[in-house]
Image: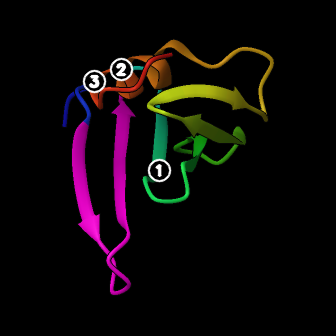
């Protein structure tokens, strides 16, 4: 699998729509998971290495299609910003 994200959209039993993707960067041996609950306007991300030597996570808060806050890292990684823009969020 290349470094291009493979987005998956899932609908849970309670009809809440979620956006979810896993981005694998094999050259850096990094995996990035991003999940957003469109109803709650909240999401999270996880970044971890294949050998489990590195792990970080954080929250994502949205309002009216715009990312308004995040935590867990000093600056949101460009890969996550790019994916959010692809999903139509203003970052």
What's the distance in space between the residues labelled 1 and 3, CA to CA? 13 Å
**Pointer 1 or 3: first along the chain:** 1
**Pointer 1 or 2: first along the chain:** 1
Quadrant of the rendering where the N terminus is positioned: top left
Locate residue 16: give its quadrant.
bottom left
Are the residues tagged 3 and 2 within 8 Å (C-beta)?
yes
* Mark 3 element type: helix
What's the distance in space between the residues labelled 3 and 2, CA to CA? 4 Å
Residue at the spot 27% in from the left edge and 24% down from the top edge: 86
Residue at the spot 47% in from the left edge and 46% down from the top edge: 33
Image-based side of 58 in relation to 46, left or right: right
Tag of residue 85: 2
Are the residues tagged 1 and 3 within 8 Å (C-beta)?
no
The magenta span reads: 6-26
Question: As displayed, is residue 37 above or below residue 68?
Answer: below
Q: Residue 83's spot in the image, x, y percent?
A: 36, 26
* Mark 1 element type: strand
* Mark 2 element type: helix
Please name the residue that numbered disc 1 is placed on.
36
Disc 3 residue crowd, few under 14, some 14–19, many 20+, Cα 10 Å = few
């Amino acid at each position: 699998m290349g470094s291009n994200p493979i987005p998956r959209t899932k609908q849970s039993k309670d009809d809440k729509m979620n956006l979810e993707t896993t981005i694998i960067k094999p050259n850096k041996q990094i995996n990035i998971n991003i999940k957003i609950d469109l109803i709650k306007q909240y999401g999270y991300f996880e970044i971890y290495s294949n050998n489990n030597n590195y792990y970080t996570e954080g929250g994502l808060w949205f309002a009216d299609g715009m990312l308004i806050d995040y935590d867990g890292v000093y600056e949101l990684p460009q890969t996550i910003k790019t994916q959010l823009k692809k999903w139509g969020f203003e970052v």
